[in-house]
Amino acid sequence: MRTIIAATVLVAVALSGGCSTVDEPDSLVDEAGYHVRDNAVYYLNPFPGKAFEIDDADAASFDIIDRTYARDSGQVYINGYPLPGAQPGSFELLERPGFAKDSRRVYQHDQPISTDPGHFELLPGGLSKDSSRVYAPDGAVLSHDPAEFEIVSDEDDYLFAEDGGSVYVNNRPIRGASPSTFEVLSGGYSRDAEHAFYFDRQITDADVASFRVIEGPYAVDSQRVYWMGEVIAGADPASFEVLNANFECSADTRHAFYRQTTIPGARPATFPPDSEVVGCSPASISFAD
């Protein structure tokens, strides 16, 4: 009986040794991305994701470009799926992550955004352009005037740009702004010869000639005080000062303000001299000891 059992075990071992299996990639031990194993091509999602076999991929010609992109003799792949219409022979990555091109198109991730790869350029601030359009960071068309398009300023989280007919801030048009006289101030404020602006909004009735930025979101002209482009009702521009821009606290000789709100009972004449504001709200203002 022992002889029969031993023989059976040997036969089973021999049979199992003669069969070969291909182990799928495992996110516990393998890096995410493409894996070629024997005649199969897999894409492994990041941990704890699973791998899937890429149907119809040609393992013999499969070329892994990076973790996201690959190609074979017939097509280009993104995250394991075919990129429709992409030409594997001319496909290449651009210097900005998520951008690539071939001889026919420019792609942002899996979307074609331009059919003019020969004139496509990457611009600062996530922008790009070709010979007929300027593109916002999300691939949407920002301007149809690339020849005149230029970045005016890219500071303090505000990117201002203009073309022959429009002005933009953070990829939004500033309605009514004239490119020929436009200038950037600071803190999101700007102006042209006739209007003052905060971000993409025109400030109604602002006096452009006397308009100036004080600090951060605060500005004044000869008649009014502004916080983020909105009038602080009752504030005196002649005596107005910012007490602490981080706490959005300000005052004139008669009142103290939190943003646009007058703080009830706060009398600037009683404020301790040379004391730092350490707290501000619609109801109170506090100073360092």
Image (cartoon, grey):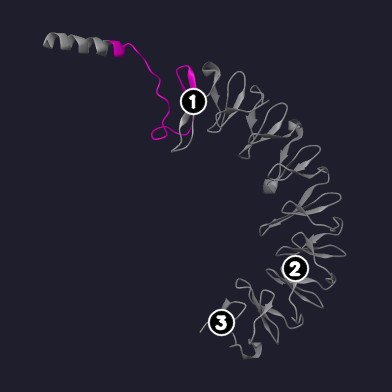
Q: Is 233 rendered above or below residue 18? A: below
Secondary structure found at label 2: loop
The residue positioned 76% from the left and 59% from the top of the image is 200
User: Which residue is label 2 attached to?
Assistant: 229
Q: Residues within 10 Å of mark 2 (few under 14, many from 20)?
A: many
Amino acid bearing label 2: Gly
User: Which residue is label 3 attached to?
Assistant: 286
Query: Label 2, label 1: how many angstroms apart (C-alpha)?
Result: 55 Å
Q: Residues within 10 Å of mark 3 (few under 14, many from 20)?
A: few
Prevailing SS of the magenta stretch: loop
Q: What number is the disc on residue 103?
A: none
Which numbered disc flags the more N-terminal residue, 2 or 1? 1
The reply to whether the magenta stretch includes residue 246 is no
Which percent across, then down, holds residue 60?
52, 16
The residue positioned 61% from the left and 88% from the top of the image is 271
The residue positioned 73% from the left and 32% from the top of the image is 117
Which percent across, then down, holds residue 261?
68, 77
Which percent across, then down, holds residue 206?
83, 71
Query: Label 1, label 3: how many angstroms apart (C-alpha)?
Result: 62 Å
**Quadrant housing the N terminus:** top left
> Is 245 or 279 nearer to us in this picture?
279
Q: Is 135 rendered above or below residue 3? A: below
Q: What number is the disc on residue 42?
A: 1
> Is 9 or 285 nearer to us in this picture?
9
Amino acid bearing label 1: Tyr
Q: Is 97 rendered above or below residue 255? A: above
Q: Is residue 25 left or right of residue 58?
A: left
Q: Quadrant of residue 121?
A: top right
Secondary structure found at label 3: strand
Which numbered disc flags the more N-terminal residue, 2 or 3? 2
The residue stretch that appears in magenta:
15-41
